[in-house]
Amino acid sequence: MLEVVEIPVTPFQQNCTLLICAETNKAAVCDCGDAKPVLAEIAARGVTVEQILATHGHLDHIGGTAELQKALGVPFLFPEEDDFWRIALPEQAAAYGFPPIEVPEPDGHLVHGQLVQIGTVKLEVRHCPGHTPGHVVFYDPETGTLIAGDVIFQGSVGRTDFPRGSWPELESSIKEQIYTLPAETRIHCGHGPTTTVGAEAASNPFVRA
Ligand SMILES: [Zn+2]
């Protein structure tokens, strides 16, 4: 069964998640914006991380990934359509006053419909473009859990004013890929508190079901 540990990282307080299979103690790290607090959490919990995932290519979601890859020696899976963001990581870091950051190299891609296995947990990959063109989310049907990155937040949605952002695409992603999930589905957001599909579908001021 999936257990989710949120680790807020970077000055943007991005919720990196440690995704743990409770039966096997195997784990994956999603959206590693900073490696140090994530490595500390991994050591404290004694889990075996087998892969690194990312929802999209923004600085606060992948800035610590090259360092984490080196420390753990495990594959990094990334949505290819966000490569223009990934490759521009040094420019993103400079623009926001971060120290120089190494660009992480993916070992594989994340595509819609793919299953990501963590021990006995099978996460379904859903393509949710709009905030970025390649953005993906991860859904665990067994526990009703969604790792949503910057698609939707409690009472808000992801920005669409970045290069290649799209409001119509974001709205469709939320309506077709998120609001179609069971109402009780727990949403872990890239920023801020956890919410549910039912709560956002009923009262999100930007996109309603
Ligand atoms: Zn973002």
Image (cartoon, grey):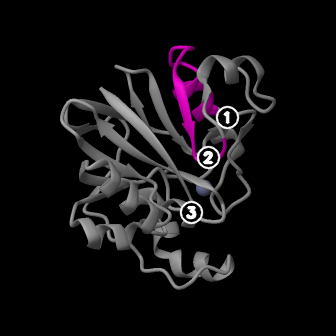
Q: Position of residue 205 (x, y in %)?
A: 81, 29
Q: Amino acid at mark 3?
A: Asp
Cβ–Cβ under 8 Å for marks 2 and 1: yes
Crowding at dot 1, Cα within 10 Å, few <14 / some 14-19 / many 20+, comes out as: many
Question: Of callouts 1 and 3, which one flags the residue occurring earlier in the amino acid sequence?
Answer: 3
Quadrant (top left, top right, bottom left, bottom right) of the C terminus? top right
- As drawn, is 26 to the left or to the right of 79? left
- For the N terminus, the image quarter is top left
In the image, which disc is placed on residue 99?
Answer: none
Which residue is found at the position 48% from the left and 60% from the top? 82
Say if 45 sits above or below 68 in the image. above
Q: Is residue 166 visible?
A: yes
Q: Earlier in the sequence, mark 3 or mark 2?
A: 3
Look at label 2 and name its amino acid: Gly
Residue 35 position in % (x across, y down): 42, 67
Mark number displayed over residue 130: 2
Q: Which span is picked out in magenta?
A: 172-192
Q: Secondary structure at mark 2?
A: loop
